Image (cartoon, rainbow, N blue to C red):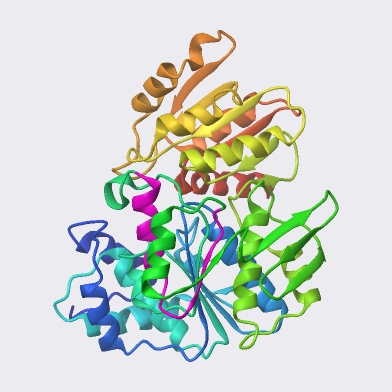
Amino acid sequence: MTNLPATLADWLAVLETRHSKEIDMGLDRVAAVKNKLAIHYDCPVIMVAGTNGKGSTCAMLEAVLMQAGYRVGLYSKPHFLDFNERARINGEMVKDDVFISTFNAVEEARGDISLTYFEFTTLAICKLLADARLDVVILEVGLGGRLDAVNVIDADVSIVTSIDIDHIDYLGDTREKIGFEKAGIFRPGKAAICGDPLPPQSLIDHANAIGADLWLFGRDFNYNGDKQQWNFAGRSQRRNSLGYPSLRGANQLLNASAVLAALEALKLELPVGAQEVRTGLVMVDLPGRFQVMPGRPTVVLDVAHNPHAAATLAQNLDNMGFHAYTYAVFGSMLDKDIDGVIAQLKDKVDHWYITALPLPRAAPIEVLKDKLIAAGVLADTEKTVTGFDTPEQAYAAAISKAGENDRIVVFGSFLTVAGVMPARRSALH
């Protein structure tokens, strides 16, 4: 490209239209450009994959390691409002000018190799983190593991948070097939941590076949607790009297235990004290993961977009106490198990405000309505289903109808939550 884009927005617009496929599995092209860029880390790298819980796990790692005084780089995705959210150094989003110069470097290195938006931006972020003189780097896998662009980097510790059915077209339609894909981030001789209490045999077999140092929940690490505090037990390290993570939700202790197992595996390279663990877990902040907003009516933002996450959301809603009526702002991608998501939440919601989303692969309103009707939602005459063109419109309608003792749950996709965030932001100012 002779005239390189001058702004980050222009760069992203170019990348969104360049490659013929949004997802193009395989690592050969990415690995070739990575080698040209000479991306190399002089610090420990922690890689996190999983169907659900990746973002929470990365956020906890970042918070605890920053409390311990380390210089921490984080790559996470997708973003809600600004692309810059995807790369953080010591908790601060990377600035536009750093992205632009790194994009220019990737563009020069790739030559005639075609890269998807995700591959190009992953290489750019991996390079800028490698150039930032960090003490530790945390990389969140996008889809699967084995063939995800992030997997061109060799991790010192790999975490698989959970394995459930999602992205069937790319990863397979059973937990065994998906477990094998997630296990692709494991490396010979390196710690391979699985936080899923019932890991597929395929994940265990692959870890053993390559000689990874497999840590299994219940065997190598565990937790117990009461309503006030909880305790972690690893292979040789115990952490007692811990406060609950500030991230709400039923699965967060599983995620936190995997985090502490990873820190135990790295205790020689990155020692972390007990108080730094306590403070980090209490201070961690992550938008859109059972995020209960201040004020009334109660508003819950949750990016749940598959049945496993929807079941967790349903459990968390049950634990919230009484609300007279529950309004759902719901939009989804068409390739998700929408029926499975609805099945988990149909008994929790009184009024469905369904919305289109600004992507070609989003589910149209008519499809969502048909699936809700097929699930028997309208069999109860008290329940309603109303369609809207945007999440913002759906949210505004829900706010206008909901009483102060009601609640609004926004879920189904990152784009659903992202569409509501600006509306909430403007309402607060």
Residue drawn at (64%, 85%), measured in percent from left and top? 270
Please determine whether, in this image, residue 317 is positioned above or below residue 21.
Answer: above
The picture places residue 277, in percent across and down from the top left corner, at 74, 72
Q: Nearer the viewer, residue 294 or 123?
A: 123
Q: Is residue 194 magenta?
A: yes
Q: Is residue 367 magenta?
A: no
Q: Nearer the viewer, residue 368 or 277?
A: 277
The picture places residue 283, in percent across and down from the top left corner, at 74, 65
Location of residue 99 (image quadrant): bottom left
Location of residue 235 (image quadrant): bottom right
Instruction: Specify whether residue 142 is in view.
Output: no
- Chain part drawn in magenta: 174-196
Instruction: Specify whether residue 233 is in view.
Output: yes
Residue drawn at (53%, 43%), measured in percent from left and top? 309
- Point out the image quarter for the N terminus: bottom left
Task: Say left or right for 55 vs 24.
Answer: right
Q: Residue furthest left?
A: 112
Residue drawn at (17%, 75%), measured in percent from left and top? 113
Task: Say left or right for 138 vs 409.
Answer: left
Task: Say left or right for 157 vs 371.
Answer: right
The picture places residue 231, in percent across and down from the top left corner, at 78, 62
Q: Nearer the viewer, residue 100 or 151?
A: 151
Please determine whether, in this image, residue 398 is positioned above or below residue 411.
Answer: above
The picture places residue 137, in percent across and down from the top left corner, at 52, 79
Please determine whether, in this image, residue 275 is positioned above or below residue 419.
Answer: below
